[in-house]
Image (spheres, grey):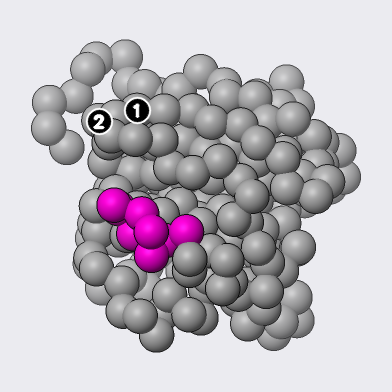
């Protein structure tokens, strides 16, 4: 997980690494900040894949395929010509996250302390058991957001879908750690290893799911510390 600014200041993260397809998609964003989030996520996933394979970032060609539309250019990202690495990426306002490894992997990032969640949304996402846990919590929104990023990661790894995520019960996974500090938490769900991150400094939370244990690699930081964003 990194801020968009941190990725864009990384010397290896040049926008010229993007493919023409990615550049066309990036150009369609109406807001420059959203465009930069997209670019940073697509660069960070290259850095992750390059590190995983021991190659340079410019040797990674990223493509996407959507299983639902059966179209190229969006949907699940993959590295062309390399079946020995699988990747996932996510971006939200000002923060991006990516993962790469030898097995299918899913990652999702969202901002901490974001909007209140309507009861109808809760019911579309959470199981009855999860709703119970959320209802008893002092921080129902925090509980919801953690389960949401976990489930989004499970969607990306192919375990569930947006339409069926309310049937996946994660109430047995560890609860959100108390307080709003920075934390790393590992657990298991079925065959998956789950890594939950909360990063107060970047103001975001993320979850990663993968069939093999998830390692946190060194963070992408610019050579000179950034002030603000
Ligand atoms: Zn699609």
Residue 62 appears at what percent x and percent y?
A: 65, 51
Depth check: 31 or 24 in front?
31
Depth check: 31 or 113 in front?
113
Q: Is residue 222 rendered to the left or right of residue 24? A: left
**Secondary-structure class at tag 1:** loop
- Return the residue found at the far right: 83
Quarter holding residue 117: bottom left
Q: Is residue 167 at all visible to an observer of this figure?
A: yes
Q: Is residue 75 above or below residue 141?
A: below
Q: Which residue is mark 1?
A: 182
Q: Is residue 92 rendered to the left or right of residue 102? A: left
Residue 17 appears at what percent x and percent y?
A: 52, 43
Depth check: 82 or 150 in front?
150
Quarter holding residue 120: bottom left
Whether residue 218 is in magenta: the answer is no
Q: Is residue 66 at all visible to an observer of this figure?
A: no
Q: Are marks 1 and 2 in contact (CB under 8 Å)?
A: yes
Residue 182 appears at what percent x and percent y?
A: 34, 28
Q: Residues within 10 Å of mark 2 (few under 14, many from 20)?
A: few
Whether residue 137 is in magenta: the answer is yes
What span is colored magenta in the figure? 133-140
Q: In which quadrant of the rendered image does the N terminus lie?
A: top left
Q: In which quadrant of the rendered image does the C terminus lie?
A: top left
Q: Residues within 10 Å of mark 1 (few under 14, many from 20)?
A: some
Depth check: 38 or 96 in front?
96
Q: Is residue 228 above or below residue 122?
A: above
User: Residue 95 bears which disc, if any?
Assistant: none
Marks 1/2: CA–CA distance: 8 Å
The residue located at (41%, 28%) in the rendering is 183
Q: Which residue is mark 2?
A: 201
Q: Magenta region's main secondary structure?
A: helix
The residue located at (57%, 21%) in the rendering is 217
């Amino acid at each position: 997980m990194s801020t968009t600014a941190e990725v864009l200041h990384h010397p290896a993260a040049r926008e010229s690494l993007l493919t023409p397809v990615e550049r066309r998609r990036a150009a369609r964003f109406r807001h420059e900040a959203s465009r930069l989030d997209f670019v940073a996520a697509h660069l960070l996933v290259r850095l992750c894949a390059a590190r995983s394979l021991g190659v340079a970032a410019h040797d990674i060609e990223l493509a996407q395929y959507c299983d639902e539309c059966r179209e190229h250019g969006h949907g699940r990202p993959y590295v062309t010509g390399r079946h020995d690495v699988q990747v996932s990426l996510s971006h939200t306002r000002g923060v991006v996250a990516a993962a790469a490894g030898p097995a299918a992997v899913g990652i999702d990032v969202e901002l901490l302390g974001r909007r209140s969640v309507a009861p109808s949304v809760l019911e579309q996402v959470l199981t009855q058991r999860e709703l119970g846990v959320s209802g008893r919590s002092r921080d129902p929104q925090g509980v919801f957001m953690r389960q949401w990023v976990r489930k989004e990661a499970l969607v990306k790894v192919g375990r569930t879908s947006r339409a069926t995520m309310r049937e996946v019960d994660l109430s047995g996974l560890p609860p959100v750690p108390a307080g709003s500090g920075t934390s790393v938490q590992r657990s298991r769900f079925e065959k998956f290893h789950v890594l939950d991150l909360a990063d107060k400094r970047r103001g975001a939370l993320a979850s990663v799911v993968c069939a093999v244990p998830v390692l946190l690699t060194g963070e992408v930081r610019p050579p000179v510390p950034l002030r603000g964003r």
